Image (cartoon, rainbow, N blue to C red):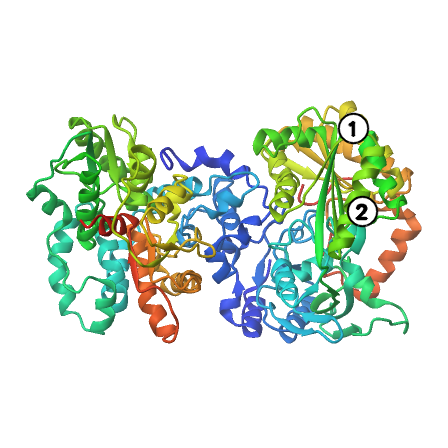
């Protein structure tokens, strides 16, 4: 709860029309793309780093939680104000400040929508690779907070690989500039990359410097159809071992294929066990050679059919199946949960098999999508939130899946972040020492614990019960 | 039919929303406003919050539920396929029951009559809203001319001499028989009736050219869509019942309309005996277009009305009509099916947002260098005509469209009728 005096002070900082306190507006900022729901006490829309700093000074003084919000599309709970407080939106911090074509960098405000940014730089012949599925709506600030990835991660890496510098407002309202525009920087602790993926718990990002690449000349898509999912998974490593690193290497299992063909048929054979979709980019001649290489590796790996797109129309057709996959799964049952367990690439076949085995064991309906090229599985759990018994089985499935992933050298999340959803498992991956070191960092940056409390780090009194569930 | 029953009936539909936020990518209102309440997700979550009693049914809730074009772009892009318009209309009906009828008439009158520029937009829209709007508007036409304001701007929107006789009256008066291969009832929508009498004439003439006997069913009233949009389900139901009774009393092979909104509403009527067709669809797909002989050396582009393209799945038929005309150069515009921002009275109630949406549409149209902007909805036509005038002021050097027409009117010209 905020007092009338605090509300008035906030209105003085950003203007009354940019402070939302009506219940109807609070209800609109109570969620992200997970199932957590909790109303904040107020929603603020600052227009500058100075206004953000003033807000944080006030919040720090009053011990009010601050939850940064971009498009609110996080899928680990990052933007949900589970302890109430102030939701601070980056909506008005939405300018592309600079595109430097000599240095191949850009400076943007956090509210810039990723897809719009990508279109802008591509029109200049440049390229910003990270491509999370939410790119048509998610913001660069949100991408930085979650270290967003995407299918192109296999060749191009994630957001962290492209952030060169940040302007961050710290919890006490001081403004910190980290990083630089240089391509190389070895000047002390790398604070820049500490903030990337910190999910709003260490500070409020108000400016981002990213590096850009030249836009590849051409791209081509190859689809391989398999009778055994193990063959598809094994082909992933074989492709890399053949020294072809495709731009994307996506896997869809039989459950996903079945749902896609039910909802919006894309010409995938329903009796296939798995489909591998690879995109290669580079020069015109280079892509043709790469595509043929991928096709031959797939055939050697047991693919029963390989389709190569030769025109943009064919390309779009092959990708429509992959793009429609989430929608097809989401329509099957009322609740869709997307998990994110990631393993070393060569362990992918093992992980896929394990997920299927656990799904069967716990009687949970799961389809597997994967950014196979970097071992990032996306088990898509089709469930019903209102069925408590089923959700208990889903919880057990998820826990055992994490245990299995961690046991083979994997991690809890490849790109979705920890948020509220996975914080209780942090010690499993990082050990008590790792979690303790993270807590000390957190305390150094945010002594009063106002920055997105309840996210990333496990609750100190955690017994397994979670806020907002 | 959507928004029958209570809002509680739509709880499960609201739960289908997984809050992914992808609606933000396609919502024309969100593109301008950027607020969470502007987009489908925010509205559906407000509904859910009401049903879960986290917030009360309220005026601010209603305000946000009304801040919507009902263009259905969200549903088309929604992975879960949430029927957003159904949820929103049910919410409007529920809020009307809970809070009473909004001060809408007063608001519309204040918003419309106080602003000359909006009066032109509003004239037919207000008529749409009234239960028996025809006489009211005919009366008001006199008053409109007395209002102060820029005469040239008024001329831009309305025909230079507003025909005081509604189209339906003209049709009843004239002879409308022909060689009868088909007996067709022509449902004349409210906007065509008072603003676009020439379109009504073209529809009849073209139908007759296709061996149709055009039957005038006396006493038909507004299809009821504006009433449904405002949550007045009782009046909408009464209008539907009235129209169904009259239409069923006259045996015909088909009911044809020139308005996308009327067409989508009539399809939702229960108990209609004859099938409903949009005029483009009727000609292109059911009857087959008689090849026109007269060339029209014009460059034409086409705007897809939301209620024709998304609600009824009719996209190809109007294009086929246009491309059947000899010498016509047809050019697709970018985002042809993105809402024009008119949406009945949205342009009145949210003029600034509506104009920003319209300007994007007009920029897309101007980029085609087409002289004629064709569309299959008289309501869109009102908005786009206003857009033509605006475009002239915004880009005096530009080559925006000069004229907005229904495809059937171009066809009529090509038949020389």
On screen, residue A60 versus residue B105, left or right, reads: right
Q: In this view, does B262 lie to the left or right of A8?
A: left
Outermost residue to the right: A433
Assign a secondary structure to mark 2.
Answer: loop
Numbered label attached to residue A356? 1
The chain holding disc 1 is: A
Provide residue B166's location: percent of width, then percent of height.
13, 50
Q: Nearest the camera: B46 or A346? A: A346
Label 1 crowd (10 A; few <14 / some 14-19 / many >=20): some
Find residue A357 and report its horizontal and vertical position in percent.
Answer: 81, 26
Residue at mark 2: A461
Residue B185 vertical position relative to residue B273 in the rendered view, above or below? below
Considering the image in quadrants, where does the N terminus of chain B appear? Answer: top left
Up/down of B79 relative to A61, above or below? above
Q: Position of residue A69 (x, y in %)?
A: 63, 58
Image quarter for residue A298?
Answer: top right
Instruction: Determine the image quadrant of residue B366.
Output: bottom left
Separation of residues labelled 1 and 2 (CA atoms): 34 Å
* Residue A400 visible somewhere in the drawing: no
At 67% across and 52% down in the image, what residue appears? A83
């Amino acid at each position: 709860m905020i007092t009338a005096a605090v509300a008035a002070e906030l209105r003085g900082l950003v203007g009354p029309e940019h402070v939302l306190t009506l219940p109807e507006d609070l209800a609109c900022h109570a969620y992200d793309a997970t199932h957590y729901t909790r109303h904040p006490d107020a929603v603020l829309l600052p227009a500058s780093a100075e206004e953000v700093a003033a807000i944080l000074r006030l919040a720090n003084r009053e011990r009010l939680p601050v939850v940064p919000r971009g498009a609110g599309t996080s899928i680990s709970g990052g933007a949900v104000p589970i302890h109430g407080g102030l939701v601070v939106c980056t909506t008005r911090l939405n300018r592309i400040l600079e595109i430097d074509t000599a240095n191949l960098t850009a400076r943007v405000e956090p509210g810039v929508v990723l897809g719009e940014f990508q279109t802008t730089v591509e029109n200049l012949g440049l390229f910003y690779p990270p491509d999370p599925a939410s790119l048509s709506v998610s913001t660069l600030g949100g991408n930085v907070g979650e270290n967003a990835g995407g299918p192109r991660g296999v060749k191009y890496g994630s957001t962290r690989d492209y952030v060169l510098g940040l302007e961050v407002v710290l919890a006490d309202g001081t403004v910190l500039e980290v990083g630089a525009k240089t391509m190389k920087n070895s000047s002390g602790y790398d604070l820049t990359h500490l903030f990337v993926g910190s999910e709003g718990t260490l500070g409020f990002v108000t400016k981002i410097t990213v590096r850009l690449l030249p836009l590849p000349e051409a791209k081509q898509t190859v689809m391989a159809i398999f009778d055994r999912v193990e063959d598809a998974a094994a082909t992933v490593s074989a492709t890399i071992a053949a020294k072809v690193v495709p731009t994307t290497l996506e896997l869809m299992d039989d459950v996903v294929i079945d749902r896609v063909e039910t909802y919006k048929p894309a010409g995938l054979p329903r009796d296939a066990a798995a489909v591998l979709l690879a995109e290669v980019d580079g020069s015109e001649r280079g892509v043709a050679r790469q595509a043929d290489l991928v096709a031959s590796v797939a055939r050697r790996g047991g693919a029963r059919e390989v389709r190569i797109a030769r025109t943009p129309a064919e390309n779009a057709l092959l990708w429509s199946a992959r793009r429609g996959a989430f929608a097809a799964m989401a329509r099957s049952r009322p609740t869709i949960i997307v998990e994110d367990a990631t393993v070393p690439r060569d362990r992918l076949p093992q992980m896929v098999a394990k997920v299927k085995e656990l799904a069967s064991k716990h009687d949970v309906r799961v389809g597997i999508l994967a950014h196979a090229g970097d071992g990032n599985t996306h088990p898509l759990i089709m469930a019903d939130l209102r069925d408590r018994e089923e959700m208990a089985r889903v919880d057990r499935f998820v826990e055992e899946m994490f245990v299995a992933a961690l046991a083979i050298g994997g991690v809890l999340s490849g790109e979705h972040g920890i948020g509220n959803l996975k914080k209780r498992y942090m010690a499993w991956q990082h050990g008590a020492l790792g979690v303790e070191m993270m807590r000390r960092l957190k305390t150094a940056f945010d002594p009063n614990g106002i920055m997105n409390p309840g996210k990333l780090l496990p609750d100190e009194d955690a017994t397994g019960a979670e806020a907002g569930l | 039919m959507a928004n029958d029953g209570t809002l509680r009936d739509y709880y499960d539909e609201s739960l289908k929303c997984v809050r992914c936020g992808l609606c933000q990518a396609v919502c024309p209102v969100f593109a301008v406003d950027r607020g969470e309440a502007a987009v489908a997700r925010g509205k559906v979550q407000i509904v859910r919050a009401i049903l879960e009693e986290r917030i009360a049914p309220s005026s601010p809730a209603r305000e946000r539920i009304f801040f919507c074009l009902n263009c259905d772009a969200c549903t088309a892009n929604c992975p879960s396929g949430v029927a957003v318009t159904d949820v929103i209309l049910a919410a409007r009906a529920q809020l009307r029951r809970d809070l009473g009828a909004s001060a809408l008439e007063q608001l519309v009158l204040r918003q419309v009559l106080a602003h000359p520029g909006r009066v032109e937009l509003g004239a037919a829209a207000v008529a749409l809203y009234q239960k028996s709007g025809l006489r009211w508007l005919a009366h008001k036409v006199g008053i409109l001319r007395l209002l102060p304001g820029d005469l040239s701007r008024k001329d831009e929107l309305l025909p230079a001499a507003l025909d005081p006789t509604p189209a339906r009256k003209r049709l009843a008066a004239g002879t409308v028989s022909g060689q009868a291969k088909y007996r067709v009832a022509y449902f004349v929508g409210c906007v065509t009736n008072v603003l676009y009498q020439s379109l009504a004439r073209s529809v009849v003439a073209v139908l007759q050219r296709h061996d149709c006997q055009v039957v005038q069913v006396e006493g038909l009233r507004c299809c009821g869509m504006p009433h449904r949009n405002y949550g007045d389900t009782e009046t909408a139901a009464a209008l539907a019942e009235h129209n169904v009774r009259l239409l069923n009393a006259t045996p015909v092979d088909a009911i044809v309309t020139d308005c996308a909104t009327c067409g989508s509403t009539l399809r939702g009527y229960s108990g209609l005996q004859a099938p409903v067709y949009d005029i483009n669809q009727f000609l292109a797909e059911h009857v087959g277009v008689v090849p026109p002989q007269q060339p029209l050396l014009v460059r034409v582009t086409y705007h897809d009305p939301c209620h024709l393209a998304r609600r009824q799945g009719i996209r190809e038929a109007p294009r086929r009509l246009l491309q059947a005309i000899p010498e016509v150069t047809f050019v697709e515009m970018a985002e042809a099916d993105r809402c024009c921002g008119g949406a009945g009275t949205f342009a009145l109630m949210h003029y600034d947002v509506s104009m920003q949406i319209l300007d994007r549409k007009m920029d897309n149209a101007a980029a085609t260098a087409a002289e004629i902007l064709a569309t299959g909805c008289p309501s869109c036509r009102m908005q786009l005509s206003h857009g033509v005038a605006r475009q002239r002021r915004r880009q005096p050097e530009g080559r925006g469209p000069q004229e907005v027409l229904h495809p059937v009117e171009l066809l009529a010209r090509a038949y020389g009728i």
